[in-house]
Image (spheres, rainbow, N blue to C red):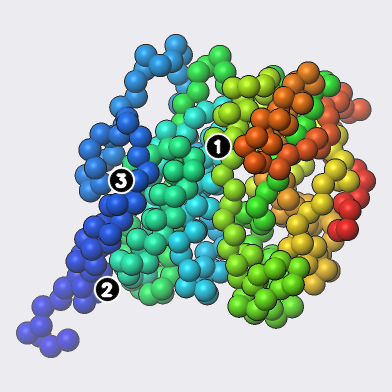
Amino acid sequence: MSESTSATYAAAGVSIDAGDQAVELLKPHAQRASRPEVLGGVGGFAGLFSLKLDRWKEPVLASSTDGVGTKIAVAQALDKHDTIGIDLVAMVVDDLVVTGAEPLFLQDYIAVGKVHPEKIASIVGGIAEGCVQAGCALLGGETAEHPGMMGEHDYDVSATGVGVVEAADLLSPERVRPGDVVIGFGSSGLHSNGYSLARHVLLEIARMPLGGHVEEFGRTLGEELLEPTKIYAKDCLALAAEAEVRTFAHITGGGLAANLARVMPRGLTAALERGSWTPAPVFALIAQRGKVERAEMEKTFNLGVGMVAVVGPEDVDRALAVLTARHVPAWVLGDVRPADDVDGPRATLSGDHPRF
């Protein structure tokens, strides 16, 4: 740069114009993911949400923050970015609903090496679709350009969601009783956890191409790995309205037993039967190609169970009927029992998975 040339933000790698263009492209997506309580539009310094307190006697706010992890690497490799936002919403709102909270709104944060407006709009389109599926509003967010810290085509996403639950309806481990029944909700695949191991096995060890057709999946490997995370928020709220739900557990990082243990009180354990469901083929393929031991698979992946409900024994049939009517694959996973050791495991698995 000559002495007569002025330094500019654009020359340093940040384009205000591209950012403005991205905002204009994403506005229709944000407008689609709204609720009556939303005040104002996209572009302000803060999102506004009118909390009509007369709806609740003693409202409790719930908040959750999460991201998507290395599943983004698959989206980047395929240059397909319209579903990663659904994954982001799922990771946030389905943590909220575990408490019984109705998701109200979500705000996203997108960090990029360089703003490509169409790519940002594609990502936000997925976030908006996820919010529609969850019944919450996309209240706004931030897109930050980080030249020199991230590659031009690199990005990462995170979000924070806020929900509300009546204090009397707050779900927690204290509600769980011996004899309660554990119901599993089928996952749509890997969801958004374990992708570092999945990519290591399938792409590096097995050297499978993302664009290659996989007979067990009936589609390409890339399509399987980018299958959006199932959002259960509305299903959980509908179930809690119709049956005696003690608590939920969102099955994410750590696997089924570890996440279910988080909502089990001291002195009780959830006894689960592996033979009650068959994991999807993608899990068997990872285990076989990577020679991954069962214990490692179970603490890394959801293995086909995306959400768990603990219900009163008298409401099992009703709970299964509600979920079936909502087209959610569901089955009895096990039950809650007094623990042999009050400080022992709060969730255990026994038996073997069929064909896994």
Residue corresponding to mark 1: 233
What quarter of the picture does the C terminus occupy?
Answer: bottom right
Q: Quadrant of residue 178?
A: top right
Which residue is outermost to the left? Answer: 4
Residue 235, above or below 291? above
Q: Residues within 10 Å of mark 2 (few under 14, many from 20)?
A: some
Residue 164, above or below 305? above
Indicate the secondary structure of the residue bearing disc 2.
loop
- In the image, what residue type sits under mark 1? Ala
Q: Which mark is residue 31?
A: 3
Side of 114 relative to 90 (left or right): left
| Closer to the camera in the image, 265 or 311 | 311
Label located before the other in sequence (1 or 2): 2
Q: Residues within 10 Å of mark 3 (few under 14, many from 20)?
A: some
Contact between marks 2 and 3 (CB within 8 A): the answer is no
Label located before the other in sequence (3 or 1): 3
Residue corresponding to mark 2: 13
Q: CA distance from mark 3 to mark 1?
A: 21 Å
